[in-house]
Every structure is written in C-alpha cells, then in structure tokens.
Amino acid sequence: MGFIKLQGDNERRAGIHYEVDTDAAPLGVGGMGQVMKGWRVDENTNTREPVAIKFLFDDLSEGVIERARREASIQISSENLVRMYGFIEVEQSNGVKRYHVVSELLEGVMLGDLLKGRTTDAQGNIVPYAQTLYQRMMADREGFAAEIVKSVLSGLMAMHDKHFIHRDIDPSNIMVTVKGNVKLIDYGIAKQLRTITTQDRQLTSIGQFMGKAAYAAPELVTGDVQHQNETTDIYAVGIMLYQLLTGSLPFEGADHEVLEMQLKKKLPLAQIKNKELRKVVEKATAKKQTDRYISAAEFRVDLERNERHMKTTTGKTIKIPAIDGGGSKKWLIGVVAAAVAAVAVVLGIVFADKGDNTGGGNEPQELADTSLPANGIIDSSEEKTVSRDGKTYRSAALITRTAREALAAGKTQEAVAELKKVVDAGYKSSAPAALTLRALYNHDLDIATDETYSAVPQDDKKAYEMLSLALRFNPDSAEALYYMGEAYFGGEAITGGLVTRDLPKAIDYYTKAIEKAKAENNNAILVKAEHQKQTVISYMQ
C-alpha cells in the first residue's frame, strides 16, 4: 500500500502526524480538492484516530487557500459540529507547497438526501439513526423538524459562543451520522465576527454569492458585512424549519430571483398548519434583524416551549382512529371506503367492480376488463391506436406515455387533463395514469420540473386517492402495492388523513410488492420494497 506521512511544523512541535493510504479510493471530490481517509497518530501515546484529510488542488488561488486555512482554524468541541483538527502545510523537495485540511471522519447521510428518502451512507450501509428520523418524518413531520432544528441550534450555540457565524446553513451541510448525531459541517464561508470586514463583500454580494440563495438572510444578499451576525444564521435555520415542516422551500426560482425575494417577499407562512410553529418561523425569518431571535439559545427555548403543540394537523379532513381491535378495524375500513367513494363521485370516476365486494370497503378490487372505448380510449397496456367505425382511438398506455412527455415539456395542464381522462375510463390499463397523478400530487414525479409543481400544488389526499384507484384498477401492480405500503407506514401524515398508520398492513403490502416486482423484473421497486419492509420490521422490534 502507498502510505504517506503528513506533518507540518505545527504537527511536529505537537508530536502529531497523519498517515494516508494513497492507493485507497477517495471519500469524495469537490471544487477545492479530494478527501481521503487518514489516521491521526499521537506520537506521544502511539494512539491512532481515523480522520478525513482534504488534499487541496495545486491550482487554487491564494484567496481560496486562505479560506481553507480559516475553515480549519474553527476548532470547536460540540456533538453537533464537525470537529476540525487543523491545516497542514508541507513543502516538498522541489519547493512546491501542498496544503491539507484535516477534520473528523464522519459517516452517515446528508440531511438533504434523507429528505429524499435515503437512509444509507455512501457505501450503501444502513444508517440506523437516519432510518429512525425518516420514519419520524413520515409519521410526525413537526416532531421530526423540531428534532433536527434543535440539534442544529445546539451546534450554533457552541459556534456563536466562540464568536463564529456559519453563513451557509442548509440540508446539504448537515449530516445525520452513524453515531446518532446531527452535525453541522462545512465552514467554508464561516467567519469570526470580529474579523468581518468589507473585504468579505466578495463572498456575499449578489453577483458573487457563495452561499445558498434559498437560505440567505437579507444582509447576506446585500453584502452588508457589518451587520452579519448570529441572527444571519438564525434566519437560515428558520428557512430550513419552514422547509422541514412543509416539504418545500418558501422561495423558489433562479438564484437572482430568490435573492430578490429574500429582500422583498414575505414567506407563505399559511403553509405551516401549526399556528405556534408558524410564529416561530415568522420570528426567525424576519427581514429586520432586530425582529429575529437574538440568539440560537432563545430560538431553541421557544421551539421547546411549543413542542407540546407539535402534533400532526391535517386541516379539514376525515379523522380515522387507530386500529385497536376487530370492531374498530371494520369501522376504519368503512370510513376509508366512504371517503374514497365520495371523492370518486366528486371527480366523476365510475368503477366497474366485478365479483364479491364484502372483503372490506377500502381494499382494492379488480375491475371488469373491457375493450370498449370510453372517452375515446382503448383498454390496452400496449401503445397503439385502433380504428373503429371510421374513428381512431388511442390506447390508455399511449395516452399515458404522451401525457408524461407533455409533463416533461412543461405542458402541465394539458397533460393532467389527458391523464384524468384515462383514469376516468376505469380500465386495468388506467393504473399507470393514476400512478403518474399520484406522483405528481406527491411532488415526487421523476420527470416534473419546478414549473410543473408550481402549476400543481402538493396534495397528499389527492395523491392517496390516485394510489387507491391505481390499485383498484390493477391489484397486481408492484408500484401501486409498494406505495400503498408507504401509505400504511406513513399513515395520516402522508395521506391527508385518509389512512391511519398500520405497520402489519404496511409489511403485507411491501411483501406483495416484492413478489410482483420479481415477476415484473422491476428491480427499482424490488430494492425499495425490500428495504422498507426491513425498516418496518426493525421499527416494530
């Protein structure tokens, strides 16, 4: 193996050196350099500790190198902050200097990835705490948001106590670790308060903005370095709290548009259902710094004070009690069936059930297979057209595919209208259209754009209704079975109040999804269903 030893003058005086296996694959590569796993060796005690060592690229400017040096100098002890060990400057025999930043080696999942459903680290290993947080997010979004934000605020309390501000807080700079911590990382544009000068304007002006526009306080946007302080970080955490509570950012668009909104536009606070939490976010994200929380500690205390209010609210939806026995289960099934049926009437959806329907109102039933045109649509999973009586009819599969293409092209309203026609037909081949609408209303459609979601607001209830129809149309659909498992796992929090959490039923649907995915050779659903099934089983133990 190609081990090398790194030791600058400071390390030599302290009796410390670092070792790196240069033959090993890097942990990651960024704009400033590549990160390798290494070991910090205390020569006095001969103890070894794993660390992350960033090898800076050779062609970096002096300004970037100085920024890396300052980042490495922020050495604060907190379970909610990444630990920095130092900056190593080594002069090679040819006179060329090489620079390295050494930090704590963290393994886990970035919060930004967790919000998208990822609970494994870079090597594909499950991160138990990430699983726990994801489960909480699905079942209790407000409690999940509070847990994350309180941890971040604890880290900021330690950072601010040492007179540093972070200035780049967002989910991509927060890690959920294998050791069960939430850690704030990346001090790339952090600053010690007493050293902020007008020279920092280049880091924060609109033209050269280096932070994240979606989380930037007004004083960052304008480059008002003299007024950047603890409340600048508090603003960013307030924006993130909004995001964790609602599932979306308050301001979206091109960076220059978002920066303008940060200066002039009010947050759409009505999206936060809990009134007490709405007040917390409003105070944290006030445009005037004097109206914000004056410290991370005050922010955290207010959040803790309001935790008693943090229960999932679903607005004016049908409330369904937990399943606690045979009688209540029958009552639950009847209520869900009534809710779905009522929605079907409103939408003008006509079902053609066949066979006995006594097994429970909300259990999907297979529809009668018919090839007769309905709304000019042929029941077929093949993409084709059929001429009949001098008219040309398109198959459900063909219309669904062209509608998805229209969505990708930004023709949202046209596409939604076509998909609804296919769903209205009530065919077995209508299931993919219903699943596409489910994903659209859930805001997790792979082909959608920001413009698409602007035209179609997120609606968990509509998403569940479309899922129910998809499974009714095709009870053997692996995708529909998987997402029904997700519905019973997440419960009211992700179904608009139409389903109460039922873990055994979630496992049952995941099991069926696995079976059907194998039959369909649908590896994507197979992997997700197996993972989620094991997650629920672990959760129940």
Image (tube, rainbow, N blue to C red):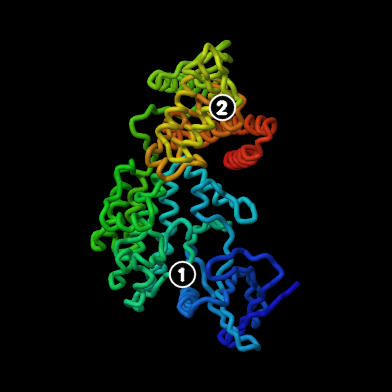
Mark 1 highlights which residue?
A: 188
Please identify the quarter of the rendering in which residue 310 is found.
Answer: top left
**Which image quadrant: the N terminus?**
bottom right
Which residue is at the front of the view, 115 or 67?
67
**Up-down: is 446 above or below 328?**
below
The residue drawn where x is 42% and y is 61% is 169
The residue drawn where x is 56% and y is 79% is 99
Mark 1–mark 2 Cα distance, whole angstroms, equals 50 Å
Under circle 1, the secondary element is loop
Most distant residue in the right direction:
1
Mark 2 highlights which residue?
A: 397
Q: Of tags 1 and 2, which is closer to the observer?
A: 2
Which residue is at the front of the view, 309 or 213?
213
Residue 120 is situated, as x and y percent measured from the top left of the image, at: 60, 51
The residue drawn where x is 49% and y is 78% is 61
Contact between marks 1 and 2 (CB within 8 A): the answer is: no
Disc 1 residue crowd, few under 14, some 14–19, many 20+, Cα 10 Å? some
Which residue is at the front of the view, 30 or 156?
30
Residue 511 shows in this picture? yes
Determine whether, in the image, residue 528 is placed left or right of residue 444: right
**Up-down: is 464 above or below 64?**
above
| Amino acid type, mark 2 | Ala
Residue 426 is situated, as x and y percent measured from the top left of the image, at: 51, 19
Residue 293 is situated, as x and y percent measured from the top left of the image, at: 29, 60
| Amino acid type, mark 1 | Gly
Residue 239 is situated, as x and y percent measured from the top left of the image, at: 36, 54
Disc 2 residue crowd, few under 14, some 14–19, many 20+, Cα 10 Å? many
